[in-house]
Image (cartoon, helix red, strand yellow):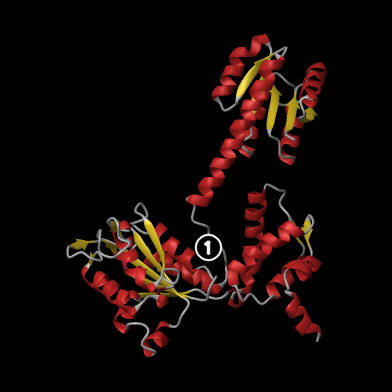
Amino acid sequence: MANILIIDDEKSIRKTLTEILSYEGYKVDEAADGQEGFKMFQGKQYDAVLCDIKMPKMDGLEFLEKAREVNPDIPIIMVSGHGNIDTAVDAVKKGAYDYISKPPDLNRLLITLRNAMDRTTLVTETKTLRRKVNKVPEMIGASAPILKIKETLEKVAPTDARVLITGENGVGKELVARWLHELSSRAAGPMVEVNCAAIPSELIESELFGHEKGSFTSAVKQRIGKFEQASGGTLFLDEIGDMSLSAQAKVLRALQEGKITRVGGDKEISVDVRVVAATNKDLLKEVEDKNFRLDLYHRLSVILIHVPSLNDRRDDVPLLVESFLDTVCSDYGIARKGIDKDAMKALQNHNWSGNIRELRNVVERLVILSGKTISAEDVDDFVVPNREKKKVNS
């Protein structure tokens, strides 16, 4: 049910509009002047506002200006007397959605409201999509290791130096890679990601370098590889410790010469790519075990960035929890939930084997299953696995 705020100093107009909109299924609040209406606008989320122009204490134009500073996405429809049409038109130029003359025409009023809220829905959906598709999430944290990573990024990102990012699963290695790209001179170019652990060893070379038609049984057409796709931008090789030795040899050549050859082809293709790699493995140990090339390790690790586990940066847990609460509640379209001190302390003391990825999932679970405020009891019920509770109690 949509919430509508009516601001008008004429009681008869407010009553008429309220009756009409309530009959149509809207939930309506009333304010007798702009000052009262602005207080209500600040304290509650409305889907649309119907606002008179000539009012005591604060007129409609002043309300419009202040309301747009608070939330420019809420449509404000000006309700004007015959002598105020020019003023109403001026209000539209200043950001009002539309204006309706007094006495209001029922059909026009309802159509205008419906269109205004449709527009609001589209604006909200567009912002959500842009955030999900384009925006690089903020690197949240004020602990010493995170501040050191941010400082390193500022120095390294503007260069074309290759970077090797290490750390456990779920610590945010991909986010570090994205900020390396975002802060670089290549930000306008593509960032192409390859998860080396998710691609079968027999297909990794085709994925990275592409292939020519007929080069193998299923190669029914030419394919452009990730190195070519990332030309002018950044190529992120995630979980590079799982790459086959034959693919490693070709990657090494590409880094040395800036050229690649497609599978089944003999033509050398120049590529302009900055390579950023990440791994949860100890690559020097992999070198000892003959699973990783030492020369490739040295090529990749011009700059080393280690991302600490969440257990090593527990001071950042409250900041991360508050951020995830904002995001999750917004994504679900529900009121922002709070969390009490004991619950936050319990989360700080939890063993985060899955790191930030696990924390994000836990916050989402708590948002879904808890009440308006997340309590320590909620954390105990929904976060700690039963098997861990049994170990503690046994």
Return the x and y of residue 78 as percentages of the image width and height. Answer: 66, 22
Return the x and y of residue 256 as percentages of the image width and height. Answer: 23, 72
Residue lying farthest top? 82
Return the x and y of residue 338 as percentages of the image width and height. Answer: 74, 57
Q: Horizontal placement of 209 versus 355: left or right?
A: left
Crowd class of label 1 (few under 14; some 14 to 19; many from 20; radius 10 Å)? some
Q: Is residue 50 above or below residue 190?
A: above
- Report helix, strand or loop for mark 1: loop
User: What residue is shown at x 36% (from left), y 68% (from top)?
Assistant: 203
Q: Is residue 325 above or below residue 37?
A: below
Please state, as top left, top right, bottom left or bottom right, where the N terminus lies in the image: top right
Residue wearing tag 1:
139
Residue lying farthest left? 267
Between 298 and 52, the one lying in front of the other is: 298
Q: Quadrant of residue 47?
A: top right
Q: Is residue 193 above or below residue 244?
A: above
Between 150 and 320, the one lying in front of the other is: 320
Return the x and y of residue 108 as percentages of the image width and height. Answer: 66, 17
User: What residue is shown at x 78% (from left), y 17% (from top)?
Assistant: 13
Between 47 and 292, the one lying in front of the other is: 292
Q: Quadrant of residue 275?
A: bottom left
Q: Is residue 160 visible?
A: no
Please state, as top left, top right, bottom left or bottom right, where the C terminus lies in the image: bottom right
Q: Quadrant of residue 242?
A: bottom left
Residue lying farthest bottom? 288
Q: Is residue 221 visible?
A: yes
Q: Amino acid at mark 1?
A: Met
